[in-house]
Image (cartoon, helix red, strand yellow):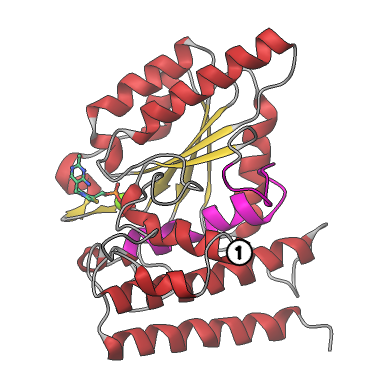
Amino acid sequence: MACNHSATSHPFPGFEKLFKVKETANYMRQDIIKMISEAKSGHPGGSLSATDIIATLFFSDIMDYNRDDFTDHSKDRFFLSKGHAAPALYAAFHQLGWIEDEDLHTLRRLGSKLQGHPDCHALPAVEICSGSLGQGFSVACGAALGMKLDAEANGTESPKVYVMMGDGEMQEGSNWEAVMFAAHQKLGNLIGIIDKNNLQIDGNVNDVCTLGDIDAKCEAFGWKTIHADGHCIKSIYDALTEAKAYGEGPVMVIFDTVKGKGVSFMENNAGWHGKAPNAEQAEQALKELEEAAQIFKKETSND
Ligand SMILES: Cc1ncc(C[n+]2csc(CCOP(=O)(O)OP(=O)(O)O)c2C)c(N)n1
Ligand SMILES: [Mg+2]
């Protein structure tokens, strides 16, 4: 997957804003490593594959949400169905100032806001308690239907509901009931996102139980599909922009991603699905991320 949108060679309108998203995604990755390493437990692989997508949702103009009040769920909403990627969500909340620096030291602690899997009771910025795979998608469908009915009754346009699943998670049968339901209800305010990193807890998705042609399957169920590079911010932005403009029914955006993206020894390695880096590994990971940030800063500086 080559991203053709480097700052120097292929600038595009609005690129400064999107490069800010890339920078933020780098800070999020650093937080993810620090949190999981300190907790000595957690899921780095699927957090790092989801980071660029979550950063683009929250830090470009894709989602229209209330940055000043994280208890306000009346505007665009994001449901993390693959709840084990909670550190990526918390890292976004940290960048928004919705959680404090000190909170980052409490991942997976008893009574903490930052439970190992998102807990909307512990942290109201979270839309749904997720982690048991195959549930968040259906809940997001219900939220989208409710918001659609409200909007129709009020003669307004419904806000959007975004929901992210893992590719391994799509093996859960309940998701296919949700796919069928959303198409039947013509949920034009629903945007599904699949983080297609080709790995799950115990290896390759294709070896465990292949999804086959996931795009064709979603289309066969009546969804519009869009396929894009999940680590190129411009591609993510364009795909989500197209998805949110559609409106006639649900859209599934399938993003090709790399599990463990941004940390060389974690990339494409299922062994890093649910394992914390030790102090030495965390140091190495942070060094790589800081170097990436420096290269990127040089690329985008005007000097
Ligand atoms: C119902 C259920 N079964 C099993 C698990 C254990 N589990 C946690 S993550 C995971 C693999 C998920 O793979 P994928 O959706 O591809 O996640 P990603 O690659 O994005 O980390 C499994 C089996 C779970 N959380 N919920
Ligand atoms: Mg996966």
Name the residue rendered at 67%, 36% in the picture: 242
Name the residue rendered at 39%, 32% in the picture: 137
Name the residue rendered at 66%, 43% in the picture: 65
Q: Secondary structure at mark 1?
A: loop
Q: Which residue is mark 1?
A: 97
Is 11 situated above or below 190? Answer: below
Residue 8 visible in the current orientation? yes
Residue 287 left/right relative to 44: right
Residue 94 left/right relative to 68: left
**Residue 302 lies within the magenta run:** no
Q: Nearer the viewer, residue 23 or 142?
A: 142
Q: How many marks?
A: 1
Name the residue rendered at 62%, 87% in the picture: 294
Is 180 situated above or below 104? Answer: above
User: Where does the image place residue 45, in percent across and percent down from the top left?
Assistant: 33, 64
Label 1 CB sits under 8 Å from any ligand 1 atom: no
In which quadrant of the rendered view does residue 72 lie?
top right
Is 280 situated above or below 292? Answer: below
User: Where does the image place residue 206, in percent across and percent down from the top left?
Assistant: 22, 45
Residue 287 left/right relative to 198: right
Q: Which residues are magenta?
A: 45-71
Is 84 situated above or below 23? Answer: above
User: Where does the image place residue 51, in percent across and percent down from the top left?
Assistant: 49, 60
Quarter holding the C terminus? bottom right
Q: Amino acid at mark 1?
A: Gly
